[in-house]
Amino acid sequence: MPMKKQFTLQEAICLGFCASFIVITRAGLRLHLNIPGHAMFFTMFFLILARGCVPRMGAATLAGLVAGLLSMLLGMGKGGPLILLKFVVPGLIVDLGGILYPGFPGSYLACAIIGASASASRFVTIVVVEWVIGMDWSVILQHAAISSSVGVLFGAAGSLMAPPVVRRLKVSGLITRGP
Amino acid sequence: MEKLAPSERKKGRPKGGYAFQYCSKDSPVHRLGAGWKLALCGALGALAVAARVPWALGALLAVNLAYYFAARLGLRDLWRDIRIFLIQTAIIVILYVVKYGPAEGLWPGIRTGVQILLLFLPGVVFVRTTQGSQMMRSLKRILPEWLSFVLFTSFRFLPFFAREFREIAMAQRLRGAPIAPRQVWKPNHWKDLFNCLMIPLMVRALKTAKEAALSAEARGFGERH
């Protein structure tokens, strides 16, 4: 199988499983909650956990991409193929955070900042879509702020749950390589 | 659409399914290839961005609705699928009216809301009419082989992990962990949720990943990707 030398097969499958958990928790929440942005809680937790378990560039993005494709396959979320952006963009931001601070999955503060920033990517998506449509800038910014603010709070809260889990997995020797 | 048992309705599952869910029907749109539907998504989405005047928006809305109903989806399905966009439209209209007043703000608000709806509606038809297996076949042609492998392995393990999730949760609840659905929404129980549920689940995932990788490598898959 011709492959890029980025992840081992085990790492790639592990990232795929993190993506599966994102989809499972989103499906679970879909049945019980109607709060906008709540799904960011587990999405950010598992994206940061993916980066913590596989500390390589692109880990969270791959987890996000697989989560997006799985959601598309399962018909979750509006917009069909556009759902990919919902997962890939936060994954990219988590990986960007990993470049700036490689040890962030073990730090509460860094996780909260990166988790909130990645959750705010919904803000960027809304801004881009509405800018393309030709909306007024002030209305775009107000609408994006209203739509993404709750998601940012949930995303930051979910991110704060990742450091103790990453630490315990490291202590138990399940995550062998780390920053 | 299959009829649901009364117990399922009691649990909050809406009669007739959820929004954006695959709907098993025999229609020309269902028979259309996933690639063609994706191409239609792109084309109709581009037209939604370009349309600004009322007649163009009206014509495009008619085309989108014809496409939607050609998939033999009903008005109830349409309501489920578009109600979230109606909320979005209401927010946008309010913001425009606050800024420009009712006379000048109403039309741009409605126009933008309709454009957003038209941008997403072809995608809704895509997920409503395309089965997972059909999407998989199309994705196999587009995605690199290693990504297809990771995607389909994850897909294959979804029910396994959903079952693991339930079983671990059940075992931990029997041991007294406060992770029942009514308890987990309280932030003071979140630590228990992650310690008792997420850590065992991740341990299971890491071990399963190792076994799956060994198994795949034994069948000749590449070492790194």
Image: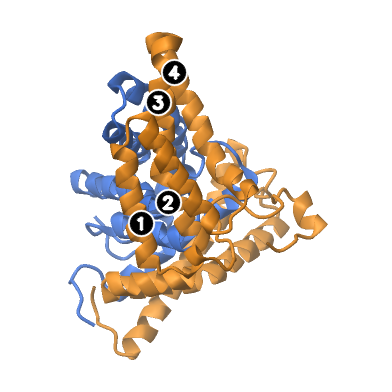
Chain colours: A blue, B orange
Please tell me the numbered disc located at residue B40. Answer: 1
Q: Mark 2 points at which residue?
A: B122
The answer to which of marks 4 and 2 sits earlier in the sequence is 4
Camera-side mark, 2 or 3: 2
**Are the two marked residues, 1 and 3, in contact with CB atoms closer than 8 angstroms?**
no
Q: Gap in Å between the C-alphas at discs 3 and 4?
A: 16 Å
Q: Is residue B97 above or below residue B131?
A: above
**Are the two marked residues, 4 and 2, in contact with CB atoms closer than 8 angstroms?**
no
**Residue at point 36% right, 71% down?**
B138
Q: Gap in Å between the C-alphas at discs 2 and 3?
A: 23 Å
**Residue at point 34% right, 41% down?**
B48
The three-letter amino acid code for the residue at tag 4 is: Leu
Q: Gap in Å between the C-alphas at discs 2 and 1?
A: 7 Å
Q: Which element carries disc 1, helix, strand or loop?
A: helix
**Residue at point 34% right, 25% down?**
A140
Residue B158 visible somewhere in the drawing: yes
The reply to the same-chain question for discs 2 and 1 is: yes
Viewer-nearest residue: B85 or B178:
B85
Residue A15, horizontal then vertical, whole percent: 36, 63
**Are the two marked residues, 2 and 1, in contact with CB atoms closer than 8 angstroms?**
yes
Q: Name the residue under label 3.
A: A143
Q: Which element carries disc 2, helix, strand or loop?
A: helix
The three-letter amino acid code for the residue at tag 1 is: Leu
The answer to which of marks 1 and 4 sits earlier in the sequence is 1
Q: Is residue B174 above or below residue A138?
A: below
Within 10 angstroms of label 1, few (less than 14), some, or many (20 or more) residues?
Answer: some
Within 10 angstroms of label 2, few (less than 14), some, or many (20 or more) residues?
Answer: many
**Residue at point 39% right, 36% down?**
B57
Residue A105, horizontal then vertical, whole percent: 33, 48
